[in-house]
Amino acid sequence: MSTRYDAIIIGTGQAGPSLAARLSAAGMKVAIVERGAFGGTCVNTGCIPTKTLVASAAAARAIRRSSEFGVSAAGPVKVDMKAVKTRKDAISGDSRTGVESMLRGLANATVLAGHARFEGPREVRAGGEVLTAERIFINVGGRATSPPIAGLSNVPYWNNSSMMAVDFVPPHLVVVGGSYIGLEFAQMYRRFGSAVTVVEMSPRLIAREDEDTSAAIREILEAEGIAVRTGAECIALEKGPSGVRVKVDCREGSPAVDGTHLLLAVGRRPNTDDLGLEKAGVAVDARGYITVDDELRTSVPGIWALGDCNGKGAFTHTAYNDFEIVAANLLDGDPRRVSDRIEAYALFIDPPLGRAGLTEAAARKAGKRILVGKLPMKRVKRAVEKGDTQGFIKIVVDADSKQILGAAILGVGGDEIIHTLLDVMYARAPYTVVQRAMHIHPTVSEYLPTVLGDLREA
C-alpha cells in the first residue's frame, strides 16, 4: 500500500523548504521527508552557528584592542564559552524551529520524519511508508569527510559538526586543513584564547585563490598569533604528550606539532550513499555526487537533485539558487540554468574575503587578455578609521569586452561590497559603469571607481 503525492522532497536544507512552499502554493500535494534536524547544514552546523561564533570572537577581539581607540577596558578579557555556545545554540535553534514550523504549516503538505530510500524511480520508502510521485526532489546535502590519514583511528578529533558541541577553550587547537572552514575556526578559537596551529598539505593556504590573496590571508592570521604550517605533504597522527601529535613533512620548522585538540577540516562528501539511488537508476559520479544537467535534472526523468549533493556548489546561496532554477523552469515557464550563475562566495575571517567570478590566474588560464586594478586597504580611509588596514581590493577586467571578469575584496566589508561588482557582472555592463559612479564618502565602496580608473595590463 502506498500513498500518492504530486511531489516528494527528500531533505530540508536550503533548497527543499522553499521549493515545498512553491509547490504547495501551486496546489500540489507534497511530501517532505527529513531524517534529522530541520534546516540542513546551514542552520545546524554551518553558516548560522559558525557566523554566530565568529561574532562572539570578534567581540573578544574588539575588547582586547579597545585601548587602541582610546577606550579603557580594565582587566583581562574573559571568554565564557558556555555562554558563547548557549547564544549560538539559541540562534541556530530559532532558525531550525522556524523551518520546521513553516513546513508543517503548509497547505497540501505532509512532513514525515525518517530516512528516505528509493525503491524505484517513482517510489520512496520513509518512516515505514511507501510514497509515490511523478516528481521527486533530492536535497540531502553533505557532511564532513574523514580522509585516510595515518593514525586517525588512534586519536580523538572534531569536524565542523562535532565542533558545535564544544563549550570550552582548547589550550592548543591544531587545525588540519587550511581552507575556508578550517581558517574560520582557527581565527575564532585564537580570539577565544586558544593557541592555534593550522596544518595544510598544499604549498599555501586556500590554493584556489590567487597567490597574493593566499599570502595576505596568511599574514592576517599570523598577525593574531596563529601558527601556519604549509607544504605538510605527509601528515600522520598519534597521541602526544598534551593530547595529539600531528606529524608533518614540511621543509621548514619542527617535523611535528603537539596540541591538545584536533579539528579536521579537509573536505566534504555528499549524503548520497544510503538513498538507494541505484534502485531508481539515478547516476552519480566517482565522488558520489548526483549527476545533473543545466536544469538540475538527474539521469532519471522526473527526479531532480538540489544543493550540495549535486556537486554544483557547496554553499547555502548556491543551494537556494538551485531552488530558484527548478521553480522557474517547472512553475514559471522561465528557462533558468545553472550555467547562468557567476561563482561567488566569502571567507568569513576578520577582515573577510568577498570573491566573485574568475581569479586573475583563472582568467589567464582561460586565455583572456586582462586588465588588473589593485589597491591596498591601508589606502582606504574607512579602513584606516576603523583601525583595520589589512588586505586589498583587486578587480580583473576583460581588456576586449571591458566587462569585469572577477574580483577579490579582502578587507573591511569585503563580504558585502563584492555584490556591487557582482551585480554589474550579471548585467554584463562595462566596468566604466562603476568607474563613473559617484559613491558615498567615507566608505570602502567609494574606492571601487578608483581601482577601476587605474587598471593595468597584466
Image (tube, grey):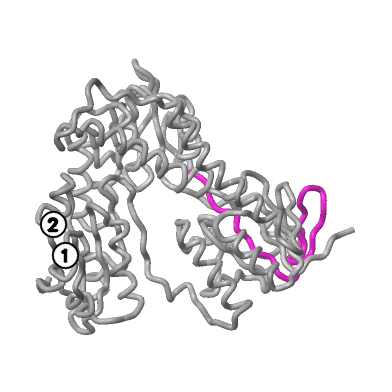
Q: Position of residue 321 (x, y in %)?
A: 49, 66
211 or 93, which is in the foreground?
93
- Across and down, in percent, residue 246 comes to 33, 28
Q: Could you say which is closer to the camera, residue 43 or residue 133? A: 43
Residue visible at 33% across and 47% down in the picture: 179
Of the numbered discs in the image, which one, if any, rests on residue 380? 2
Question: Which corner quadrant of the image does residue 80 belong to?
Answer: top left
Residue at the image point whose x is 65% and y is 55% from the top: 102
Q: Amino acid at mark 2?
A: Val
Mark 2 lies on a secondary structure that is: loop
| Residue, far right | 1
- Real-space Cα separation, disc 2 to disc 1, in angstroms: 7 Å
Return the residue at label 1.
Answer: 447
Q: Nearer the viewer, residue 82 or 66?
A: 66
Q: Residue at x 42, y 72 (%)?
A: 341
* Residue extent of the magenta highlight: 119-144
- Residue at point 53% right, 82% down? 335
Quadrant of residue 350 within the rendered picture:
top left
Report whether 264 appears left or right of 368: right
Q: Residues within 10 Å of mark 1 (few under 14, many from 20)?
A: many
Q: What's the mark number on residue 5?
A: none
Place of residue 353 in the rendered image (x, y in percent of width and height, measured from the top left): 28, 54
Residue flagged by tag 1: what amino acid is it? Answer: Tyr
Given residues 259 and 232, the one toward you in this image is 259
| Circle 2/circle 1 CB separation < 8 Å | yes
Up the image or down, 252 lies above or below 126; here it is above
